[in-house]
Each structure stands twice: as C-alpha cells, then as structure tokens.
Amino acid sequence: MNDDRYEDLYEEYILPHFEDPYNKLLIQAPTCQHSARNPLCGDTVTLQLIIGDDNKIEKACFDGNGCAISQAGASILCEKIEGMTVEELESFSAEQMLELLKVPLTSTRQRCGLLGFKVLKTILYSRDGEKLSASTES
Amino acid sequence: MNSINVDAIRDDFPILSQPHPSGRPVVYLDSGASAQKPRAVIDAISDCYSGYYANAYRGVYYFGSRVDDALEGTREKLRELLNAEEVEEIVYTSGSTMSINLVARGWGLKHLKPGDEILLNVMEHHANLVPWQMVAQRTGAVLKYLPLTLDGRLDLEQLPAMLTPRTRLMAVTGMSNVLGTIVPLDEIIPLCHQNGTLVLVDGAQIVPHSQLDMRALDIDFLAFSGHKFYGPSGVGVLYGKRHLLEEMDPVFGGGHMIDQVFLDHSTWAEIPAKFEAGTLPIGPIVGLGAAIDYVSGIGFEAIHRHEQELLYKAHRVLSEIPGLTILGPDVEHKGSIVSFTIEQLHPHDIADWLDRRGIAVRAGHHCTMPLHEHLGIHASTRASFGMYNTLDEVDLLAEALEYTLKKHHLPA
C-alpha cells in the first residue's frame, strides 16, 4: 500500500475514531464488563456490554488509554457490534476485526488493534462458562 | 585528535544500504536495543563456519585447535578491552541477562542470608532487577532501592545512608537504557567497598560506547552483551574478580565445567570453565572478537565524540518540537540515548509513523516498567545512536516527528 493511500485510510478511519470515539464512557450497570492491557506498552481497553433478553447487544461502550490503533479499534468495535446477536459475535473473527481497521498493520500493531476484540472474546467465553455452570446447577 | 569518517563507517555496515519498504533510506536509531554488524564481523563468523569450525576444547585435530585459538584469542581481547588482570576472569555467557543471573544464583544463593540487603534502583533494566527478586525470594534477602533525583540520576547523597552493615551487593547500570544517565561508577564503587558491599555493573549500554577499566574502577562483576557491541547475538560476557568467581557455585552443570565426574557427585573445573557448561556459542564468540577489533580500530574516544555530537544535536532539535519532553538528565550526564514523550501522541503511533519514513526507533517500556511507573507514564519513545548515525539523520528524526504531529492534527 503506498504512502498516500495509507495516510488517507488513517485519516478517514483511524483518526476520527481516535479523536471522537464512539461510546467512550462507562455506565453503571452493564450486563458484562472486562478489561485488558497490552503488557508491551500499557494500552488498556475496558469494554462494557448491555445484552438484551433477545441476546442482542443493546449497547457497547468502552474506556481506555493508549495508542491510536488500540483506542480507535475499541471505538470501531463498539460501533460495529451494537445490534448484533451474541451468536453472531461468537463467530466474529480476528480477521474481520482487522478488516474493519482498514489500515494494514504489522503483527506487533495487530495486537494493539485487536485489544478490544480480545476483551470482547473474553467476555463471551466467560458468559458461556457462567451459562454452563448455571445449567449444571439447575 | 582523530575524528571518525562516518561515511566510510556506514559503507562497512551492509544493512544500512538495504532497501526499506518505505522507499526511503534506512535510518536506524535503535542501537540501544541491538547494534548493526559491520562486514568484518559477518565475514569473521562466516569464515569460521566455512573455514575451520569444530567443537571447542575437545579437538586434537587441526580445526579444533584453530577454534580454540579463536576462542581464547577473543578472551584475551576482552581481558585487554576491560583491563582485567587475568584472562580467567572473563566468562563467556549468552548475554548480559545470563551473566547477571549467573551472579545472582551462583554468588547470591550461596552468600545471601535472610535480612541481607541488595541495593538496586528504579531505573534498572528488568535484567538487573528480576534475577535479584528471584534470589531474594529464595534466600530471604531484602531489596532496597536507591532514590533517583528529579532529573533521573542516582541520588548519591542518599547512598551512604542506604549502605548498611547488611548491604551485601549493589547492582547498578553503567548507563540507563532509557534515560541515558551515565552512572558515576568511580564515585559509587569506593563508597560501596568501604562498606564491604560488592558492586555488579550492568554494562550492556555503557561498554559498547565507553571503555571501562575493571582495575581502575575496581569493579567486582560486570555483565555485557555482544549484540550491542556491533557483534553477534548469542554471546555475552561476565567479568568477575578471580576470588569472587572462585567462591561462587556453578549454576549450569554439564560438560567442560567439571574436573571429575563420579556417579553421585562431580568436582568442578577451574574458572572460567566452571561457568561455561556445554558447548560455547563458537560462531558468536569469533564474531565478538572481530567486533572488538573493529571498534578498537576506529577508537572509543573518536566514536564517543561523534555520539556526543549526535546527542547534543538531538537534544537541541527535539526540544523545539511542541509537546515533546525529553526524559532524563541534561546532556552532560548522558550517553547517546534520547527517550521522550509527546503529548497526545502514543509511542506506538510515533514509531509506526517513523517506520513509514524509514526510521527505526523503539516504543514501549524498554524493559523498565518500574522506571516508567516512577515517571508516571505507560510508555516512551527512544532513539539511540551508534557510530554509524549522522547529524542529518537527527534532522530526519525531527522532521518525521513534526510530520507525525501534523498527521494527528497536533501543533507542529
């Protein structure tokens, strides 16, 4: 990808999400919440989800600190997943997440871009765990 | 007073003329992480493997004796470089980190009692913190931290008070890999020795840039790595005074470090073999010898003067960039490392944008999490200079930073 194209994509997708993030706020009573840190540089993302009875994501919001790719990634993720069902999220892949970021990333920076995604996946797997243990108890 | 010919030096380093995906010339400002290698080093290693390679210390045959000559020849070069008294005080390791671990375990596990103190400080690299934490856990020794001044130097006024009758060893860097701070070993070591405290110097950053004299400084232990010395990775050095090495237990057991092996116990070889279990990194040691020759051929003084010029210029031009703060002390107290933060610009983003312009810098915590915690930041960006960097490259760095600011809609 040439310089200009990269810079256009960065300007069009990454910077707006970094400077004016979607749902960058934390709410009082989310359905679930989780945080993660990138130990290499201290990027942090906290993700909160409100999941309706229909198993759809009613609201996704985040907070965090870090590089433009990690924070824009979290913002882009929140904007994307509202309205999706939990089932759809479970099959939402890392490749699809990276496509949303548009700009090509080295493997080191992919870790930044996937930080919010990693938090999301952790939330989903923990929920599965809770559902499983709830069903074995009843 | 000779000065270096940077253009000639750059021609010696093949990687500097490699094509870069950005289409721009390579501007390598990460020698603090690892230095590039001159052709002389690359060729020396290649010549060994293609011309006379064999295992070490075992071959009665021709190649074996040539390898032995090469390995012991480099050991003597190291002795001379460091002005160590004896060649047996030079131990080959896999790097600074392993060297420090050898002392922490080989000396520490044997000599540390509960309540004994190890004196550290928060600007140390993890390699000179974690091994001491590990050995303190096992022995009941206690870690103490010498405070820093506001501008990132060791607060030497506090040193006498922190040297107690229980302070067995002080582990200290010769130069901070983040702040660039040059530690005045000539002030610290006498104070420590008066107190009966040994001193281990993490020489990873300082040794490639400034010739240290083991005897003049009366250093007890020194660790450094080949790969920051324009040599290959996989080899490092532990220097230790003879009596200290002799008092230490070996850490790695196996071939070569033994004298006799029985079924239930073994006796140890003399130093340095006692700490060189197994097969040494033969190619890398040959490369390290060539690196020492190369650097000595150009001259430490001349290289140092050049790097100081780069440092001074970097401080000057970077200070003019809005929102940029240079970490650490003033230039008079520093070696050729410039770490900085820029308001509202994360080090990862900086490093990424700079890479797009062919410039390699390092972003993150640089294996100094306690230091970054102390500074109240998550991460920083670091430019570190080697003999092959130019004053023009400092301008390119500043221009690229300004460009990055503009791309992020920040004042430049």
Image: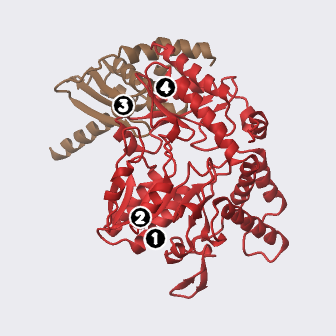
Chain colours: A brown, B red
Q: Chain of mark 2?
A: B
Q: CA distance from mark 2 to mark 1?
A: 10 Å
Q: Is residue B238 visible?
A: no
Q: Tag on residue B99?
A: none
Residues indicated by labels 4 and 2 sit on the same polypeptide chain: yes
Residue type pointed to by label 4: Asp
Residues indicated by labels 2 and 1 sit on the same polypeptide chain: yes
Q: Tag on residue B107?
A: 1
Q: Could you tell me which secondary element the residue under label 4 belongs to?
A: helix
Q: Could you tell me which secondary element the residue under label 2 belongs to?
A: strand
Residues indicated by labels 3 and 2 sit on the same polypeptide chain: no
Q: CA distance from mark 3 to mark 2?
A: 54 Å
Q: Tag on residue B169?
A: 2
The residue labelled by disc 4 is B349
Q: Dots 3 and 2: beta carbons under 8 Å?
A: no
Which of the two discs, 4 and 2, sits closer to the camera?
2
